[in-house]
Amino acid sequence: MSNSALTREVRLGTVPADSSSGPPARKRRSLRRNNRVGYLFIAPSIVGFGLFVAYPLVMSIYYSLTRWNGVTKPQFIGLDNYVYMLTKDPVFWIAVRNTLVFAVISVPVSLIAGLALAVLLNRKLKGVKIFRTIFFLPVVLPSIAVLTMWKYLFDPQFGLANQILSWLHLPTSQWLSSADTAMPTVILIGVWGVGGTMIIFLAGLQNVPDELYEAAKLDGAGAIRTFFSVTLPMITPILLLQLILQINGAFQTFNQIAILTQGGPDNSTDLLMYKIYTDGFTSVNNPLMGYATAEVWFLFILVMIVTAFTFRTSSMWVYNANETRN
């Protein structure tokens, strides 16, 4: 069939338009076959996301609107859990306040301690690898064992902390047994686990170009000026990452409270995550799983607001090499 005849047949619709284009048709069939293989490979991930993320997420919204003990059939009560949580629960706002105080103090303390250790251990000193291992060791130890050890060290009767203060003729403290000193003691104990923060800061410090330090040295900058003018600006992306991780970790702190204080004394260390646990699981005769789910959503929204604010304001202090080039 001549080209003119084939064109006429295509216009009349008696011949498929792609009948003369064999290679593109094979390409489309190959593309469809590759797509089917691709969908087959990602199917387990999609099913897993649906079963273990999407479905629990949707059901948690429903359970937060019910009176449910985790065993019997949920009873839909609308927004009653949220109304009681925000207006009538005598401990809820105490837990929120304690959580915010814990986050506001513990996050900067952990960041400063981790960065200071990283700067010290970034120097070329003899035996520096041994010190890096020692400071990182608490990260790999079971947190329950470490926290139990700290609990005995700060025991007001026979703990080593008060014995050392006595030897130095300094006043002793009630540490975890007093409402005035329990929260500062919990925050102090949390600093023990800054080894993970230190390692990430250490990796960031080792990526700072040596040329910048040499230029600062030629300009006569001292150690402090070099740190604030070169080191700190160059690691601000790492600092933002650590800040986000520390904020999320602070709002979800549970082990420290469960092992050290159980929220006491007088609710002075009752953080929101620990209150969710006690409301949902420890009331044997009347567990409030539906109410605890409502508290979880409040905590989720609170963390999202703080994280979004941190990201929103990060452009004012985080160094971006691409923006500098433009």
Image (cartoon, rainbow, N blue to C red):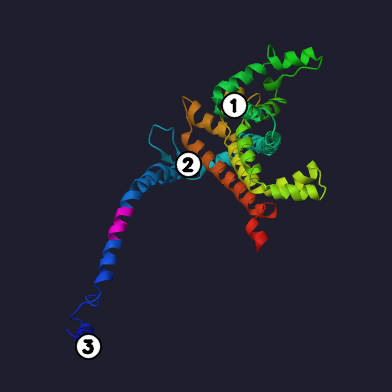
Q: Nearer the viewer, residue 77 or 52?
A: 52
Find the distance from the CA under tag 1 to the CA under tag 3: 82 Å
Do labels 3 and 2 touch, CB within 8 Å?
no
The residue that label 3 is drawn on is: 4
Asked if residue 176 lies left or right of residue 219, the reply is: left
Residue at (63% x, 25% y) in the render: 264
Q: Amino acid at mark 2?
A: Ser
Relative height, residue 139 to residue 311 (above, below)? above
Secondary structure of the residue carrying tag 3 is: helix
Magenta region, residue range: 32-38
Q: Which mark is residue 138?
A: 1
Residue at (70% x, 28% y) in the render: 184
Give the label, 3 or 2, closer to the camera: 3
Question: Which mark sits nearer the N-terminus, 1 or 3?
Answer: 3
Asked if residue 110 lies left or right of residue 297, the reply is: right
Question: Which mark sits nearer the N-terminus, 3 or 2?
Answer: 3
Find the distance from the CA under tag 1 to the CA under tag 2: 37 Å
